[in-house]
Image (tube, rainbow, N blue to C red):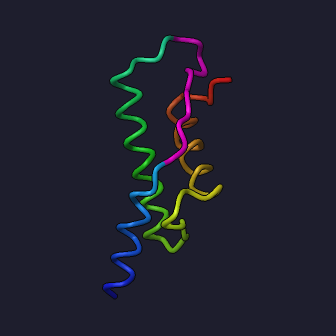
Amino acid sequence: MFGVVLYLAAAGCAPLPQTTFSRVDGRAVDPKQLSTDQAMCQGEIKNNLSTGNQITIWGPTEDAIAVYTGCMAQHGYKVAK
């Protein structure tokens, strides 16, 4: 049990790659709101862990990144090019 808790804690600390987001609707990005939305979406990754999906402790997997960018899309953002 302790190993699972340690695993989950370590996996939650794996940094996501730096990604720049823009608004889908073309409006300017509010830095405060972006920060709030990013924190919420990072929490989605942790929620995924608690439901049994695995994210490696050495860095985010493609699945973790997909969860994060999907969550950001639900909040009105897209990855800026």
Identity of the residue drawn at 54% across and 46% down? 68
Q: Residue 32: which quarter of the image?
A: top left
- Residue 46 image point, x, y percent: 42, 60
Q: Is residue 6 magenta?
A: no
**Where in the figure is residue 63, as x and y percent of width and height?**
63, 58
Instruction: List x then y, in percent, for residue 41.
Output: 45, 45
Q: Residue pushed farthest right?
A: 81
The quadrant in which the C terminus is found is top right
Q: Quadrant of residue 35?
A: top left
Residue 25, quarter of the rendered image? top right
Examine the rendered structure and indicate whether residue 12 appears above or below residue 15: below
Label the magenta part by its dominant secondary structure.
loop
User: Is residue 61 shown above or below 31?
Assistant: below
Q: Which residues are magenta?
A: 16-27
Q: Residue furthest top?
A: 27
Q: Quadrant of the N terminus?
A: bottom left
Residue appearing at x 43%, y 61% in the figure: 47
On the rendered structure, is 22 left or right of 3?
Answer: right
Residue 22 magenta: yes
30 lies left or right of 64: left
- Residue found at the far front of this picture: 58
- Total count of labels: 0
Above or below for 50 versus 26: below
Q: Residue at x 43, y 48 (%)?
A: 42
Q: Residue at x 55, y 27 (%)?
A: 21
Position above or below: 40 against 12: above
Which of the two residues, 63 or 25, is positioned nearer the viewer here? 63
Give coordinates of residue 73: x percent, y percent: 58, 35
